[in-house]
Image (tube, rainbow, N blue to C red):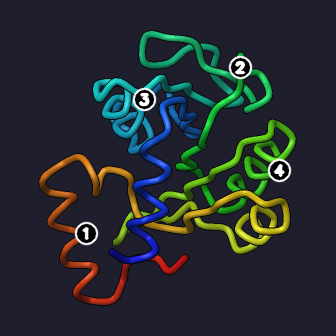
Amino acid sequence: MSQFEELARDFLAQKRIAVAGVSRNPNETANGIFRTLRDKGYEVFAVNPNADSVEDGPCYHTMQMIPGGVDGAILVTTPEHSTQVVYDCVAAGVPRVWMHNNTWLGSSVSEEGTAVCRQNGITVIAGGCPMMFFDPFHKCMKWVLARMGRLPAA
């Protein structure tokens, strides 16, 4: 098992996960990840500084606003916003951060954010997609990317 898969399995073994970038638009990638986690029994928390509610539930403006904190945060934001969300994760004591990467489209990965995670003892996954561990299409993509050597390195 690759280091990416080990980190991803540890991340997904947690039950309280925030998804930053969930939008009022239900067609956004973050919303799909949020719904999948919710449907799989995770306690998920939407984070977006510009929304008070999304996906039929509350939306928190910052990680610090989430009651009881979270075990991990998935960032589906621009790299610039990811850096700010990472600082927010540090302040909130979030121990794991996963910066989403769409293989052919935009990425949430921020070099500065990744460095800040490491400097603050936060386990970071810089790339890949949690859906690779749930959905058959994405599982196939994980297999293909592994063969191509394009899964994120830890």
Which residue in the structure is indicated by mark 2? 68
Which residue in the structure is indicated by mark 4? 87
Q: Is mark 3 on a helix, strand or loop?
A: loop
Q: Distance between the residues labelled 3 and 4?
A: 25 Å
Residue 75: image location, x then y, percent: 57, 49
Residue 142 is tagged as: 1
> For the residue carrying disc 2, how many other residues have a C-alpha within 10 Å: few (<14), some (14-19), or many (20+)?
few
Which residue in the structure is indicated by mark 3? 25
The one nearer the camera, 77 or 154, is 154
Q: How far apart are marks 2 and 4 (CA)?
A: 18 Å
| Precedes in sequence: disc 3 or disc 1 | 3
Observer-side mark, 3 or 1, equals 1
Q: How far apart are marks 1 and 4 (CA)?
A: 29 Å
Q: Quadrant of residue 73?
A: top right
The amino acid sitting under disc 2 is Gly
The one nearer the camera, 116 or 52, is 116
Residue 152: image location, x then y, percent: 46, 76
Q: Distance between the residues labelled 3 and 1?
A: 26 Å
| Precedes in sequence: disc 3 or disc 4 | 3
Observer-side mark, 2 or 3, equals 2
The quadrant the N terminus occupies is bottom left
Residue at image x 77%, y 72%? Answer: 115
Observer-side mark, 2 or 4, equals 2
| Precedes in sequence: disc 2 or disc 4 | 2
Q: In which quarter of the image is residue 60?
A: top right
- The answer to whether mark 1 and mark 4 are in CB contact below 8 A is no
The amino acid sitting under disc 1 is Lys
| Precedes in sequence: disc 2 or disc 3 | 3
- The answer to whether mark 1 and mark 2 are in CB contact below 8 A is no
| Precedes in sequence: disc 1 or disc 2 | 2
Q: Is residue 118 above or below residue 154?
A: above
Q: Quadrant of residue 39?
A: top left
